[in-house]
Amino acid sequence: MSDRPKVSIVIPLYNEEESLRELHTRIADVCDKENLSREILFVDDGSTDKSLRVLRELREKDSTIRIFSFRRNNGKSAALQTAFSRVRGDFIITMDADLQDDPQEIPALIAKLEEGNDLVSGWKRKRHDPISKTLPSKFFNFVTGFLSGLRLHDFNCGLKGYRREVVENLDVYGELHRFLPVLAHKQGFRVSEIPVQHHARKYGKTKFGIERFLSGFLDLITVIYLTGYLRKPLHLFGSLGLMAILLGLAINVYLVVGWIQRIWIGNRPLLFLGVLLMVVGVQFFSFGLLAEMLTRQEEKSREYSLKLDTDVEKD
Ligand code: UDP
Ligand code: MG
């Protein structure tokens, strides 16, 4: 095997012992048929079944396999990041270990990358999952697309292709694996998608259950933050605050005019509204100002990602 394989296939897995042999055979078949030099990185995310033993067996027969194993379950994002900082291929393909993603799609993903895209995301056009998954997922995709300005049908597909430059620049932690296209898009990488085959889960069970609903809400906040809405807090809170102040001021001026004309204003609900609006407005405004100061500090230390060949001094 040459030092640099063309493609690195990255597979995070957590208790998927039944699927691994079949998955490996199918990946190897596709790569052999297409003459793709490869390495396969399996990241065992603290499995408690026989996954790791199966992987070691597979590696005996296939030297392109590299295994990384966490001592405990750290999550899919951590698994991906671990592989991303170690890949050697020009192109990176990620896929789930449960055979829901089809290795047959690897050549199509690479072709799309070679067209000049930096990240190509799979789109499970015909999805084989229960409605309790597909419905929240539709909502998630819509909101993420709306807030990020990146229109994809399917942000959270396990099957994706990347140029190595992209994964070197990504920092995946927490639950960020759901937003990889957004993160890449924000750094200025070219992101696109292709429809891919999707299969029902054959063995084992999904690792993302009902708690997904809860984390969905928190994810939403993550997207809002990631997509830069909170990078200009004064624009949001300042304008809200100013509007409230002006409205309150108008009401109070109107009441003062009445007071000068000796119209009794102390028992008018409008007075309370006017005062309330002004107080809330000032609070909004100062909150925005504070948030802006905090953001400034953060922005100062922000690193922007550069194109690979631009690190050359020019005079
Ligand atoms: N996975 C992982 N760590 C986890 C949870 C899941 O590495 O903590 C892997 C899992 O083994 C699978 C992939 O991430 O290869 C996608 O998980 P799953 O199939 O359960 O998600 P779903 O397809 O139901 O969205
Ligand atoms: Mg799955």
Image: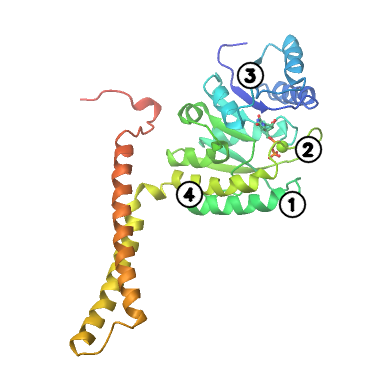
Q: What number is the disc on residue 131? A: 1
Indicate the position of residue 232 as horizontal and vertical percent values: 34, 50
- Name the residue located 32 percent from the left edge and 42 percent from the top edge: 294
Q: Which residue is mark 2?
A: 201
CA gap between label 2 and label 3 equals 26 Å
The residue under label 4 is which amino acid type? Answer: Ser
- Name the residue located 34 percent from the left edge and 34 percent from the top edge: 302
The residue under label 3 is which amino acid type? Answer: Arg
Q: Earlier in the sequence, mark 1 or mark 3?
A: 3
The secondary structure type at the circle numbered 3 is loop
- Name the residue located 65 percent from the left edge and 16 percent from the top edge: 67
Q: Quadrant of the C terminus?
A: top left
**Contact, mark 2 vs mark 3 (Cβ under 8 Å):** no
Q: What number is the disc on residue 71? A: 3
Q: Give the quarter of the image for residue 264.
A: bottom left
Indicate the position of residue 86 as horizontal and vertical percent values: 54, 19
